[in-house]
Image (tube, coloured by chain):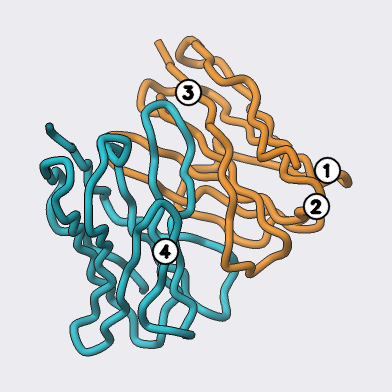
Amino acid sequence: AQSVTQLGSHVSVSEGALVLLRCNYSSSVPPYLFWYVQYPNQGLQLLLKYTSAATLVKGINGFEAEFKKSETSFHLTKPSAHMSDAAEYFCAVIHTGTASKLTFGTGTRLQVTL
Amino acid sequence: KAGVTQTPRYLIKTRGQQVTLSCSPISGHRSVSWYQQTPGQGLQFLFEYFSETQRNKGNFPGRFSGRQFSNSRSEMNVSTLELGDSALYLCASSTRQGSTEAFFGQGTRLTVV
């Protein structure tokens, strides 16, 4: 079964520093991969998705992620963190050919300090 | 364009009661999925509806059920509530079954006491 593993339940960065949130996937076939963000008491907002087109995917709010098949990774990055980026981030996967069932990672809470 | 609307936003119920949550998808979206989010289990898929039919189901007991109406609005029902059912219930809508982009509502926070 498809799954994703997020390394690090909490990540703290200084404002202006690089943000790197890690996600590794497990799938025997090319997956569709997603990053979602959740602010307190809110639903999930799609940041970006990989659907087997370009391996470097650009999303909203300056975030991007690179699909690396050799490393089975789909890490999320942002060159310069902003206080408003503080939230919980979820990596997710769906398997092509099935219904729209998302399997989520356990989430990474990003803290941004001054 | 209005987003996904979930009602109510907050709910407190007593053990043993039943509860019904509602989700109105984005206009024109025909697929609705439900997820449960808890601190211990994270985000888990409950079920998906498309064209008033359940198309996919997660690993939850039969106390959890749902339905979809002809206007694509969906409801989920939990009977005989347990303390462990306390969670944020999220609804997501997509244009069609198998779509790779889901739009989430703000969720219903259910507390069982």
> Are callouts 1 and 3 both on one chain?
yes
> Are callouts 2 and 4 both on one chain?
no
State if disc 2 and disc 3 touch (CB < 8 Å).
no
| Disc marking residue A34 | 4
Q: Is residue A55 above or below residue B72?
A: below
Q: Earlier in the sequence, mark 1 or mark 3?
A: 1
Q: Residues within 10 Å of mark 4 (few under 14, many from 20)?
A: many
Q: Which color has been applied to chain B in this rendered view?
A: orange
Q: Chain drawn cyan, letter?
A: A
Task: Residue at 41% x, 29% y: name it.
Answer: B87
SS at badge 4: strand
Q: Is residue B107 above or below residue B10?
A: below
| Mark-to-mark CA distance, 1 and 2 | 6 Å
Residue ID for mark 3: B109
Between label 1 and label 4, give the one nearer the viewer.
4
Location of the N terminus of chain B (image quadrant): top right
Residue ID for mark 1: B69
Q: Amino acid at mark 2?
A: Glu
Q: Residues within 10 Å of mark 2 (few under 14, many from 20)?
A: some
Q: Position of residue B44 (x, y in %)?
A: 41, 48
| Mark-to-mark CA distance, 3 and 2 | 25 Å
Q: Is residue B40 left or right of residue B28?
A: left
